[in-house]
Amino acid sequence: MRYVISLGLLLVLLWLALSGVYKPVIFFLGAGSVILVVWLSVRMDVVGVEHNPVLFSWRLAAYWLWLLGQLVKSNLHVSKLVFQIDKVRPRLLTVPVPHQAAVSKVTYGNSVTLTPGTVTLRLTRDRLEAHALDEESARDLEAGHMARKISWLERQAEGES
């Protein structure tokens, strides 16, 4: 029950932050939306320990900040590649996925795709296949910095420090 309540509270806070309109009719529609999403989540059996919206606590915010820095860095790199087209050497690569939880694996795949210069093509239990725009992007992915950051999130979710 606490997971359902935490999901509901998180959705209410997100809705309030994003809507920007605080009129009675809009509050009513927002409450209905939140109730519908929570009900559907319970019906689909996606509310629980692994899907807890507050699973990663403060570490998720730290990861988002780190990822934002990576996005800026990658955007600048890809912008340089636009003017140095001879350095573009597309490459397909496969890297290990060291994560146990499905949500961590999906976070990894989505983070790779969000980062300019790399796109996740396939995500399996233990492998991630990706397309990299150039050698530097491929080396960054093979180095495993992003995978280690997500493992840091996963350890917190499991109760380790």
Image: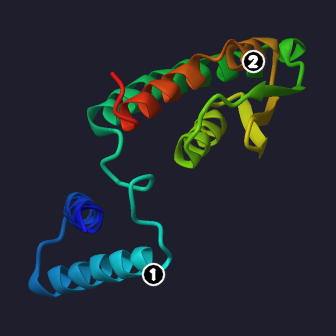
Which image quarter: residue 62?
A: top left
Q: On the picture, is 39 further left or further right than 131?
A: left
Residue 70: x and y in percent read 52, 22
Q: Nearer the viewer, residue 4 or 72?
A: 4
Residue 111: x and y in percent read 58, 36
User: Which numbered disc, 1 or 2, marks the residue closer to the eye?
Assistant: 1
Disc 2 target residue: 81
Q: On the picture, is 115 further left or further right than 28?
A: right
Image quadrant for the C terminus? top left
**Residue kind at label 1, given as amino acid type:** Arg
Task: Give the mark, 1 or 2, whose residue is nearer the N terminus.
Answer: 1
Residue visible at 24% across and 78% down in the picture: 30
Above or below, 86 relative to 17: above
Q: Residue furthest front?
A: 159
For marks 1 and 2, give the CA distance. 47 Å
**Residue kind at label 2, given as amino acid type:** Leu
Residue 132: x and y in percent read 80, 26
Q: On the picture, is 98 further left or further right than 13?
A: right
Image quadrant for the N terminus? bottom left
On residue 43, the disc is 1
